[in-house]
Amino acid sequence: MALLHFLCKDCAGLELQIVAAHVNHCLRGEESDADEEFARQAAADYGVEFHSIHADIRTLSNSSKEGLEVCGRRIRYRFFEDLAGKEGQIATAHTLSDRAETLFLNLVRGCGLQGLGSIPPVRGKIVRPLIDCSRQEVESYCSENGLLFVTDSSNLSDLYTRNKIRLQVLPALTAINPSLLDSVRHLTDSVREDQEFLQQQARQAYMECRTAEGLDILKTAALAPAIRSRVCSLFLSEKGIPCDYQRITETIALIMAGRGRSNPSGTCFLEAYNGVLACYPSQEEKVAFDFSFSMQKQKDTFVLPDGREICVQVVVGNESDGKNLKNIYKNVSLLIMDCDKIDKIVKIRQRQAGDTICFSHRRGTKTLKKLFNELRIPPRDRDVLPVLADRQGVIGIPGMGISQRVVPDQNTKRLCLCSFTNKNLKTEIKNL
């Protein structure tokens, strides 16, 4: 009532277009309905447009697995924001007493500077004209102006943590320091100023640490701890990941380690690799693939689970023809092998433990595990890379090369051509 009177009477010269909004949380039966009717009548008395909704907060909170207070707040502000639209502002009647309650509530639950800043006077389109007035001062304002108001009976119950702070903690602290609310005001104002400065520094650092793939690990690790944690928070927020102490701590640990993975949410995972902290969508279990191509066939095309295609074709030709094809199809990932050196069947499959290859243009045999490590192929991509093999082992990897034992020579009569579309693979594989 104090806020409505203040906006309609004391701010009349501002020519505000005021709309009153009320949410019936359906928690107190007839009392909740009576509160709604009181608000409706008050709006009518001031000639103000009135909007209300009913929200069964108990049922909604059970469904969303939120506490009653958190769920109620979410529903209220969503309703208010819908009413305000793009141009409107949302004025709430929070007081300095509410700010004190929120400060200690955040403190006992565990918080950083943002939590210690408590309820800000302005946040986005939300404004709080009474935030520097105590509850007692607001009630005195109502008495002086002959304003009737109702008290939510649930505010008198100590079942809720906030109520325990209001009814037990604040009176005890006020007995120690009668100017407690002034101290709360000074602390929260000071903390918010510090937080705003640190956030400004963090935003600047974040822009400097960002890369096309994610966060530059070396640059982020070199930041001061206070800025580093905020940069991680900005990164998580940008990726749609809820920020809390545990998630931020896990993200910092990845950065400081320089490698590893974490799953901060059910929709994505973080991976530190090759100097970058990146965020990727959580994927379903990778689908295995295993195709076969007989050297007796002329041509076939195989579609991998992720949509990439491999085309295998047998043509008449020799070593010179193979070199000409390489020159013609420079922009195609093309493997050219001697058909008659392949052990009957080409298998297109995922890597297997113990796989090795001796490339035609390099000396020595190397395991695929070591090869992929040297090429810095992220672990997430290694099991989706197609490997060509016959009964004797790996004969080629698209984009990398072929085994020494299937290289065409002057005696070659038939060529096995393998072309590969690599458009969906996130990692650009380097040619050896």
Image: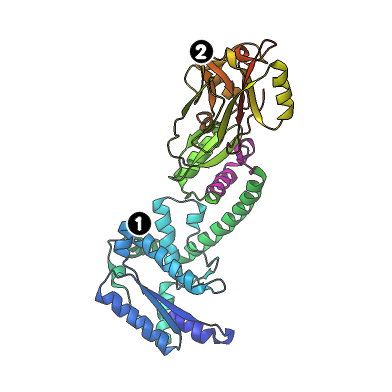
Identify the image quadrant of residue 137. Answer: bottom left
Kindly tell me whether residue 231 is visible in this rendering: yes
Kindly tell me whether residue 168 is visible in this rendering: no
Identify the image quadrant of residue 64. Answer: bottom left
x and y percent of residue 314 in the render? 60, 23
SS for callout 2: loop
Q: What is the CA distance from the residue labelled 1 to the residue labelled 2?
A: 56 Å
Provide the major secondary structure of the magenta segment: helix
x and y percent of residue 156 in the render? 29, 69
Task: Report the amino acid beneath label 1.
Answer: Ser
Q: Looking at the picture, tell me which residue is in the foreground, 413 or 205.
A: 413
SS for callout 1: helix
Q: State the residue at coordinates (42%, 81%).
A: 50
Query: Comparing marks 1 and 2, which lies closer to the viewer?
Result: 2
**Residue range corresponding to the magenta coloring:** 210-236
Q: Which residue is mark 2?
A: 392
Mark closer to the chain start, 1 or 2: 1
Q: Which residue is mark 1?
A: 64
The scheme the figure's colours follow is rainbow
Q: State the residue at coordinates (30%, 57%).
A: 62
Q: Looking at the picture, tell me which residue is in the foreground, 100 or 278.
A: 278
Q: Looking at the picture, tell me which residue is in the foreground, 296 or 79.
A: 296
Quarter of the image with the C terminus is: top right
Quarter of the image with the N terminus is: bottom left
Task: Report the amino acid beneath label 2.
Answer: Gln
Q: State the residue at coordinates (45%, 89%).
A: 47
Q: Is residue 64 above or below residue 272?
A: below
Q: Which mark is residue 210?
A: none
Mark 1: few/some/many CA within 10 Å (<14, 14-19, 20+): few
Q: Is residue 28 above or below residue 424?
A: below
